[in-house]
Image (spheres, rainbow, N blue to C red):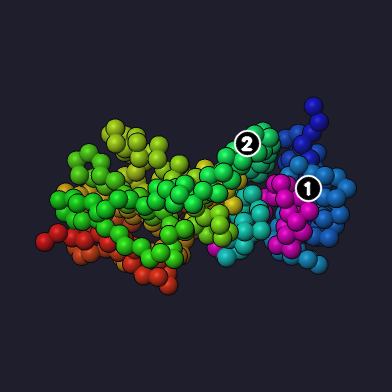
Amino acid sequence: MSLSKVLVIEDDTVFSGIVQKFLEQRGYLVFAAEDGETGLALCQSEHPDVVLCDLMLPKISGLEVLENLLFKTSSLPVIVISGSQQISDIREAVRLGAWDYLVKPIDQLDILDTAIQNCLTRTSLEDAWERERWELDDHIDVLFQSEDMFERLRNDLLPNGALELPACKISHQLCPRVYDQVLLDYHRFPNNQALVFMAYSQGQPGQNVLALLVLKSLLNPLVRQGMSGEDGLLRAPHHLLERMNTELCHSRIRSAFDVVAVWVNGNTGDMYASVAGEQLSLSTEHKPDLALGIWAQAHYAQHSFKLDEDVAIELKNVGTLVTIAKHG
C-alpha cells in the first residue's frame, strides 16, 4: 500500500521541520517548500494527496498559492495553517477552497494527523459519491425544468402561517426578492416549546434553492426527533449549529449560510439563541459567529434572554423577516 503524500508549504523552517518529522513518524511521505512558488512546483511534480499551507509566505501569499492550486486541481485537499484568527482570513481561505483551517500555535500535533485523515477519508467518500452523482443530477435537472415543481420546492422552504404559543406569537413576512435565498422553519414541540430556524444562503445565483433544500434535509431528522420528545439538541441552538456546520463542511455544498436559531419556551418566554454570519441578526444585538459551511472547527455561542418585548430576526438591507411578539 503506497504512502499518502503530504506537501508542507511553510517558511518557518523550525516549525516545518517539526511537522515534517512528526508526519514521517506517522507514516506519511512528506515534501517541504519554504515559499509559494516552490510549493506550486512540488505540487506539479509530486502530486500530493494533501497540502498544508501557511498564509504568510515570501514571494507569493498563501491565498495566492491556494487559488493557484485549486484552479488547477479543484479536488485537492488544502489545509491552511496560520497564526491569524481573523474571520476575514478564514472566510477568504475557505471561499477559495481550503478544506480546513488550523490556527497556530498548534500545541498538539495529533490535530494535524486528524485533519489529514479527515481529508483523506472525505476524498475517498466523495470519489464514491461522484461516481453515483450523475444519475441524481439528471433527476434534479428534470425537477428544475418544471416551473410548477420548482415553485413547490421553493414553497417547502417556508412555513404555513403563524405559530401561536401561550407567551408569544411567531409570524413572518418575506419580500419576494429574497424568496430564493431564505429557509424559514418554526415548529411547536411538546409542552409549548418551539424552535425558530432561519437561514440565508450565500451560494451562486440559481443554486440557492437546492442548497437550502439540502440544509433543510439536515434539519428535518432533528425536528422529527424533537417531536417524539428527543429535543435535547434543539434546546441548545449552539450545539445545533455546530452539528449542522460539521455536516455542511464535510459535504460538497459550495455555499455558506447565515443562520439564526432560537429555542422558545412558549410558557415562560425564556429564549435561547445562536447567530451565525452577519447577514441575519436578532434585534437583541448579539454578536454573530462564523457563518455555517465555512470552517469545520467553528464554535457557536448561546445567548439566553427573556421575552420582555418583541424580538425580530432581520436581514441586512432588507429589514424584519420574522417577529416573535409577546402576548399582553
Image position, residue 292 (x, y; %): 50, 53
Residue 7 numbered tag: 1
Mark number for residue 135?
A: 2
Residue 174 image point, x, y percent: 36, 63
Callout in the foreground (2, 1): 2
The one nearer the camera, 42 or 81, is 42
* The stretch drawn in magenta includes residue 78: yes
Q: Nearer the viewer, residue 252 or 117?
A: 252
Image quadrant where one finds the C terminus: bottom left
* Residue at figure coordinates x 55%, y 54% from the top left: 207
In the shown orientation, is residue 288 left or right of residue 171? Answer: right
Say what amino acid the circle numbered 1 marks. Answer: Leu
Q: Residue flagged by tag 2: what amino acid is it?
A: Glu
**Number of numbered discs on residues:** 2
Residue at left offset 29%, top offset 36%: 227
Quadrant for the N terminus, please: top right
The magenta region covers: 62-87
Q: CA distance from mark 2 to mark 1?
A: 35 Å
* In this picture, residue 4 sits left or right of residue 222: right
- Residue at 64% across / 49% down in the picture? 99
Say whether residue 125 is visible.
no
- Kindly indicate the quadrant of the structure image that contains residue 167: bottom left
- Give how far across and how far down residue 185 sits, in percent: 35, 50
Circle 1 residues within 10 Å: few <14, some 14–19, many ≥20: many
